[in-house]
Image (spheres, coloured by chain):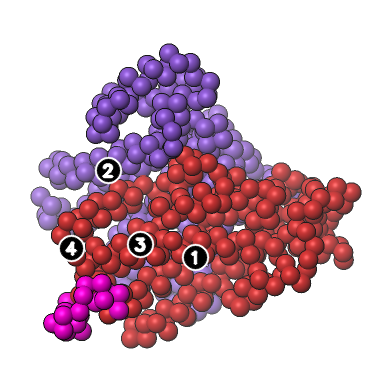
Amino acid sequence: MILFWIALAVFGPLVWTADPTALNLGDSLLPPSLTHPFGTDSLGRDVLLRVVNGASVDLQIGLFTVLPALIIGSLVGALAGYYGSFVDIGVMRLVDIVVAFPFFVLVIAIIAVLGPGLINMYIAVGLVGWVSYARVVRAEMMVAKQMDYARAARVLGFSDTRILLRHLMPNVIVQALIYSTSDFILNILLGSSLGFLGLGAQPPTPEWGVMIADGYSFLARAPWISALPGLVIVALAAAFSLFGDGLADYLRPEIDR
Amino acid sequence: MGAFLLRRTALLVPVVVGITLGVFLLIRLIPGDPARVLLGIHATPEALAALHKSMGLDRSLGAQYVIFLKALIRGQLGYSYFFGEQVVDLVLARLAPTLFLIGYATVLTVLIAFPSAILAALRPNSIWDQAVRFASIFGIGLPSYWLGVVLVYAFAIAIPILPVAGYGETIGEHFSFLLLPSLTIAVSLVPLVLRALRASVMETLRAGYVDTARAKGLAWHRIMGRHVVRNALMPAVTVLALNIGYLIGGTVIIENVFAIPGLGGLMILSIGTRDYPTIQAVTLVFAILVVLVNLLTDLIYVFLDPRLRAVIR
């Protein structure tokens, strides 16, 4: 199922080369039919075509919001956990400030300051999202650095950098990776919510949240515009959440779920 | 109890300081002159100079923060040039609908999640249990705003029986106007709490005192009401409190779907008009709200579990 979505995102626009943003006002608000299986929107664009193109947009949102947070958060958390003392205190106070705010509100506030748009949305989510990874990795690191293999590496005189990156990181990153799969889904939902509110992807980008907002204005006359993108989000999220459960089982076989 | 409250409140001080620091730094994130940002592009040079002086922009960041804090303590959150009003008044006027929505949604969440969790826990692997598990997998990915749109279609367009925009005038109207928005938030919150609730009810069912109660021959509804539900309430409160940030995020979105004149609507409106003092204030209020809910949660613990009273005294 995951492969289906990725294939759809990568190959969909290649196979079906029509432009998802091209206007065709003569065909506006057509109900579902054979030529337009899910109808057309207010500007005569095929809803199915836009949803297919939206797959790559929304998967990219998931990727570009998770990756920076995962990398920065894991590094910061690892350093804080490994070195302890003032590095740790400094990092954790910063974390405390960020988590005092409701996640969504803080993201919106940062977007408000930077201005709406996809890139600024990535920055905002990254600025807030890293704390979860930092917390997870820090906790793991504090345990891992006491393990025998870490002590052995230290006795052997390896440098801190080498111990951190080669010996400890591969062990502590697992938990962060498991978390990142559920974060990925939540961030796609977040990204599409922001698109819906007009703060994320901007029209005419075929982003699912933007499409639902488009359709909302024509709900009484053309409910199909909002229907399909929403169903697709639900299906995609379910696929990835099952994938996340499976990955957690695979990476952590010793935990009996 | 008083001493507990005092000590618990003292613990909040660093959190609140952190929040004010965060909100203070937020405006400093904008490249350029903060005074110009706050006043907007049509500001006169005189107004700019006056604000420069009052914000202490010629002084250090630390001094600016102290000035910001002093104003905050006096209850000054700035002036909104877009609305032509003090931001404090603006925020206070919009607070009630948001609080109403949050409370209403929480009650609906409990009303949906609790019976479902109990039914699922009583008969593990039954059809009902499977349905609950299915709902918690698919429900996680259900975008609340889309659900809102679907409900608007169902109850306002297909079968027009409920109002879908605004807040209403009387208390009764508040309940009917906010039914769909609250239901939307509740449905998106239920999957998050369901799994934990089911586990906690199952654990309570296995406890010794439940067996004792059963052995005494107590009626089933008495066992459930007095013993199981009351003990499973604690984890339920924890789960709900943990999701308060999520709940508040939900209200921001849903207020915009249903055109409710609350803080979330105000926030999105202010972004469109680049009304930074208002954005700053709403962010602050939402964060303080989370702090207060956490405080309230601790009080509910003490109320629910008399054993804690002995511990904290």
Q: Viewed as shown, does residue B179 lie left or right of B117?
A: right
Residue B88: % across, % down: 40, 26
Residue name at image x 63 percent, y 72 percent:
A5
Specify start and end residues of the magenta stretch as a single range: A146-166
What is the residue that sits farthest to the right in this orientation?
A26
Residue name at image x 32 percent, y 58 percent:
B238
Distance from label 3 to label 4 (Cα)?
Answer: 16 Å
Res. A23 visible in picture: yes
Between disc 3 and disc 1, whose residue precedes?
A: 3
Is the C-beta separation of discs 2 and 1 under 8 Å? no
User: Can you tell which mark lies on residue A73?
Assistant: 3
User: Can you tell which mark lies on residue A84?
Assistant: 4
Q: Residues within 10 Å of mark 4 (few under 14, many from 20)?
A: some
User: Can you tell which mark lies on residue B18?
Assistant: 2
Q: Report helix, strand or loop for mark 2.
A: helix
Tell me the amino acid under the disc marked 1: Phe
Query: Which mark is in front, 3 or 1?
Result: 3
Residue B223: % across, % down: 32, 67
Q: What colour denotes chain B?
A: purple
Q: Is residue A147 above or below residue B25?
A: below
Judge if badges 2 and 3 mark residues of a common chain.
no
The residue beneath circle 1 is A184
